[in-house]
Structure formats: structure tokens, C-alpha cells
Amino acid sequence: MQIEPLLIALLRLLGLVPAPTAAGPRSTASAEADPAPATGRVSHPIPSPRAIGRAGIDLIKQFEGCAKRRADGRYEAYPDPATGAAPWTIGWGATGAGIGPGTVWDQAQCDARLATDLIRYAREVDHVIGDAPTSQNQFDALVSFHYNTGAIHRATLTRKHRSGDYSGAQAEFARWVHAGGRIMNGLVRRREAEARLYSRA
């Protein structure tokens, strides 16, 4: 998989790089398409290697937000709401090495990290689901789920998707709403949104 063309494509979807002026068909599916029941059939599967589309990016940005913005316009890391400490998060939900108390990024750093993270998470989802027929909206929902939970490798949701049990996979989103032993309303809303997007197979 070539990373540079994917990064440019994602930066275009994020609105950070102008799109080509020539008119052409849209390459990603829209979340506004008529919903279809997850019945074990995918009308428009996308080939591998798959990349996240606009609907998935918008969903992730909606729930992650770009926080915590300071008076100078830059963003500082904040602690996990469930633990009050690690993992520390910055920008569009970025965590990991080098992010902790005192970490400060500007908007360009936040956006660039989102783009590279989306490539990584999409690649991991693509690898795990293998050759299972998958629509763009299903893939976007799975990437959003993995971006938030990191659980695509072990989730029953993944196993059911791979087996073609799309109704069962859709129902599995609702199980991933706990943090710190508590049900988090934000996670409930996110899983509902991901399940709706997934259902638009």
C-alpha cells in the first residue's frame, strides 16, 4: 500500500489540500444514502486495499472533536475522562508516545496526525477483515470503531462481519460503551452513529 497518495487523498477529504479541478465521480460513498438492512449481502463492496471515506472521517471528527483549544489557538493534551490520567489525548483523539501533560500542538499538527492515524487504522481494519465483502459505509464504521477502541482484532463484531452476519455485527457496536467500569453517554451515542452508518450497506 502506498502511503503518500493515501495521505494526500485524506488531506483532501479533511479540506487541507485542494481537490483537483477536473470534474469526476466521487470516490467515496455517502452516509446520506438510503439505509439498507444488514442482511448478509453487500450491494457495493469495495476492493482491498480499502481507505476510509468522507462519512467515516466526518463521524470520527464529530465525536473526537479537536480539543483542548487554548487562548493562543493551539491545543494541549488532556487526561482520559474515565481515569483522570493516562492515556493522555490531544487534537483529534491522538494518543501514544510523546503525548502527555504539557504536550501542545498547533492545528496543522493535529490535522496531520489525524491523517496519518486514519491511514494506519484503515490499514489494520483492512487486514483483519480480509476478503469479507465490505461496503464503504461498513468500512468507515469499522475504522471509526477501531480508532476509538483499538479492538478490531479481538471484537466479536469483527468475527460476525467476516462471516457475513451483518445484522449480528451491527448489534455488537452497542456492547462497546463502557470506560472505567461505567457506561459513558458519549460512547453510547458514538456506537449508535457507527451502527447506523454500518447499516447503510
Image: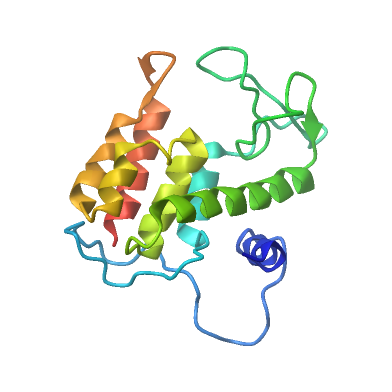
Residue 150, image x, y percentages: 49, 36
Residue at point 51%, 41% (across, down): 147
Q: In which quarter of the image is residue 69?
A: top right
Q: Disc count in the image?
A: 0
Residue 31 visible from this viewpoint? no
Residue 109, image x, y percentages: 77, 44
Image side of residue 158 versus residue 77, left or right: left
Q: In the image, is residue 3 above or below residue 74? A: below
Q: In the image, is residue 41 above or below residue 155? A: below
Q: In which quarter of the image is residue 84?
A: top right
Q: In the image, is residue 79 above or below residue 59? A: above
Residue 163, image x, y percentages: 24, 53
Image side of residue 134 versus residue 39, left or right: right
Residue at point 72%, 64% (across, down): 4
Q: Which residue is situated farthest in the right direction here?
A: 72
* Residue 51 vs residue 193, the one in the foreground: 51
The quadrant of the rendering that contains the C terminus is: bottom left
* Residue 74 vs residue 114, the one in the foreground: 114
Residue at point 35%, 37% (across, down): 155
